[in-house]
Image (tube, rainbow, N blue to C red):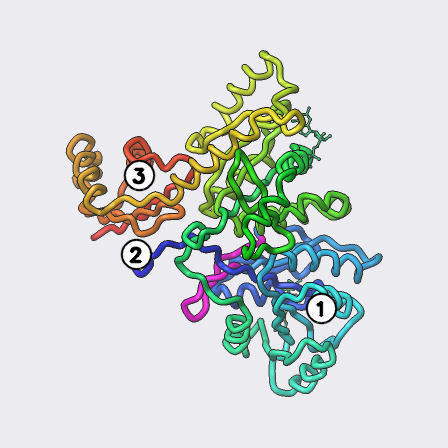
Amino acid sequence: MSAADEPSASPRPVVAVVGRPNVGKSTLVNRILGRREAVVQDTPGVTRDRVSYDAEWAGREFVLVDTGGWISDATGMAAQIAEQAEAAIQLADAVLFVVDSTVGTTDEDEAVVRVLRRSRKPVVLAANKVDDQRFEADAAAMWNLGLGEPHVVSALHGRGSGDLLDALMAALPAAEQGVRDDEQGGPHRVAIVGKPNVGKSSLLNRLAGSTRSVVSDLSGTTVDPVDELVEIGGEAFRLIDTAGIRRRVKEASGSEYYAWLRTQAAIERAEICVVVLDASESVSDQDLKILSGVEEAGRGMVIAFNKWDLTDEERQRYLRREVERDLQAWTWAPSVNISALRGRNVDKLARAIDAAIEGWSTRISTGRLNAFLGRIVASNPHPVRGGKQPRILFGTQAQNCPPTFALFTSGQLDPGYVRFVERRLREEFGFAGSPVHIQIRART
Ligand code: GDP
Ligand code: GDP
């Protein structure tokens, strides 16, 4: 496996795909991913859940954020598109701005251009729907946007997408592959995520008191203006997207999708996510969606049960039952009962975050791993299936951040057996606060 022994902790650069509805953003995202994963809809304005996708070009990994699922109405469209673009752009390392050359530039395009100029983020302009040469003159007209060369593409037919991606890679900030922030002496990147009203801004305000002194202590550390350095329990962390947490009014005026877009982008940029839940209320689908999102992104996770001051013994008893029933999948995540309002246990978060960072970045040597696997195979062999008994032959930790194991086997393993191996791995080596990925390489 090619990724063997390459730590992947450094955040992949995030590219926001921005443009007004129907210019072909989703089609272009599909083209770049090389598979029909993003859903293309002919009706603009249908909400899509999934907005960020892992992509790769010329050996470089990056994350594409498709803003195409945003809900619009006809009134004040230019302003709304600009606002949507702003949210996406703030969190991106570079922007892929898509325009429709068959339509020409519109007021909405101009509104986005103003936002792009202010952001000073690198922008690559894609003049889409140039299905054949006859339309190239239309694309050339896009020079008037003042964003440099319009890259002529046809997302539908694939024309020009290679050149576009080359330009995009050139626009991304220099790669820091395999270098973690802590190896550079920088603070860890932490995202505070959670549905509206659970107390994210209260927690942020509680933490932000010491910000200034931390910043001066760490002079020379570059921080994106949407991020903030804070001190938790005496330790400095880089909080991702504090601007997003503070801009509550704007989020309230946008759709729920909007908040979800930001949450996903923040998760992508973080090493560890603190998922804030409201301990005084029942666990909701939205909470579960965020917990799953963190796990799927392979980030470390700490669960903070906030508003603990509002819970009485009865509620706490009930909460324990809810946790057992609904949060079974995440028992590996350390949890802390806090009150952002009163300051209760907030400094304990630092210890939980540290534990999660440690679990997330743990490396097990191949020797230790195989000694452990040998013991498992001897004491709990895989059940016989159709007269055959698949065996784990050998294993290696392909990656950390999160810990990812490749198991070489003599046949497909039952999902139940893989879960058993994961449970035993955790018992043996910890990995608290981190998802653990197991890949099976069956020799047939
Ligand atoms: P989005 O709203 O910006 O995400 O746009 P979509 O990707 O959903 O595309 C809107 C419509 O434009 C769809 O009907 C696509 O098939 C069409 N489309 C996208 N790219 C191209 C292209 O390169 N050429 C042509 N002719 N149509 C395209
Ligand atoms: P956000 O939308 O997640 O940023 O949530 P806020 O921080 O704005 O909090 C929503 C509401 O919950 C506000 O009225 C807060 O005062 C309240 N709140 C936040 N944390 C606590 C807490 O620990 N205890 C109590 N009782 N209320 C809280």
Q: Residue at x 64, y 79 (%)?
A: 150
Determine the main secondary structure of the stretch shown in magenta: strand
Name the side, left or right, on which 436 lies relative to 168: left
Q: Can residue 49 be seen from the camera position used here?
A: no
Tell me: is circle 3 under 8 Å from ligand 2.
no
| Residue 137 horizontal/vertical position (percent) | 68, 87
Q: Is 157 or 298 nearer to us in this picture?
A: 298
| Residue 42 horizontal/vertical position (percent) | 66, 61
Location of residue 17 by image quarter: bottom right
Amino acid at dot 1: Arg
Please tell me how crowded label 2 is: few (under 14), some (14-19), or many (20+) other residues with Cα within 10 Å.
some
The single residue placed furthest to the top in the displayed view is: 313
Magenta region, residue range: 51-63
Please tell me how crowded label 1 is: few (under 14), some (14-19), or many (20+) other residues with Cα within 10 Å.
few
For marks 1 and 3, the one nearer the N-term is: 1
Q: CA distance from mark 3 to mark 2?
A: 21 Å
Tell me: is circle 1 under 8 Å from ligand 1.
no
Amino acid at dot 3: Val
Would you say residue 193 sits in the magenta stretch?
Answer: no
Q: Secondary structure at mark 2?
A: loop
Name the side, left or right, on which 128 lies relative to 320: right
Name the side, left or right, on which 118 lies relative to 368: right
| Residue 60 horizontal/vertical position (percent) | 44, 66
Instruction: Report which residue position mark 3 lands on.
Output: 418
Q: Residue at x 62, y 18 (%)?
A: 311
Q: Residue at x 70, y 44 (%)?
A: 246
Q: CA distance from mark 1 to mark 3?
A: 50 Å
Instruction: Report which residue position mark 1 lands on.
Output: 117
The single residue placed furthest to the right in the displayed view is: 75
Q: Is 244 or 386 nearer to us in this picture?
A: 244
